[in-house]
Image (cartoon, rainbow, N blue to C red):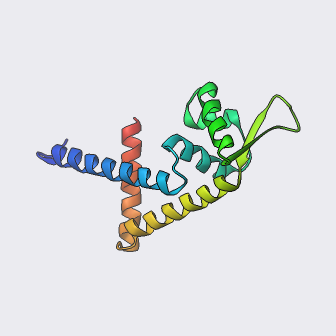
Amino acid sequence: MVEAGNEEKFLSVMFNLSSAIKSESERCCRICGDLNEKELFIIAFIGENGSVKMSAIAEYLQAPLSTLTTIVDKLVANKFLLRYNSNDDRRVVKVELDRKGKASYKEFKNRREVMAKKVLGHLSEAEQESLIANLTQLVTSIQL
């Protein structure tokens, strides 16, 4: 049962959180090479996983391969990504980070670390664990 007044407080906090995340995401996209959010997600995914198949990125983004191809074409042209055919199966297209992509990924990781320290830095270890557990529960509740 939801306590009286908590529903409005929750919705207000969620709106403010969403706005703060959006602002930070936009700032990060600018800092990481003037990218849009999907482009940055692609660079982050490849940075975390190394050389990956185009189909794996499409699955991760839940986007059609045709849409992904257009985005990757732009990132290849702008020297963020390298695209090549797999040695095992020439039909398989793989991508990895190019020079600018590596720099963007490094900046992205740095921004994440700064944000984590900014949010968690003033909390005790118990408060950090509680916040993480509550956020995990929130994500699970939203996804139901």
> Residue at 59% of width from left, 50% of height from top?
44
Camera-nearest residue between 66 and 142: 66
Q: Position of residue 73 (x, y in %)?
A: 66, 35
**Horizontal and vertical percent for residue 63?**
56, 30
Q: Is residue 60 above or below residue 45?
A: above
Looking at the rendered image, the quarter that the C terminus falls into is: top left
Task: Where is residue 68? Give x, y as percent.
Answer: 61, 32
Q: Could you say which quadrant of the image residue 59 lies in?
A: top right
- Tell me residue 53's x, y (percent): 72, 37
**Residue 104 appears in which quarter of the rendering?**
bottom right
Is 1 located above or below residue 115 in the figure? Answer: above
Q: Is residue 79 left or right of residue 20?
A: right
Residue farthest along the front direction in this orientation = 77
93 relative position to 69: left or right: right
Q: Residue at x 72, y 47 (%)?
A: 96
Q: Is residue 139 above or below residue 88?
A: below
Front residue of 110/36: it is 36
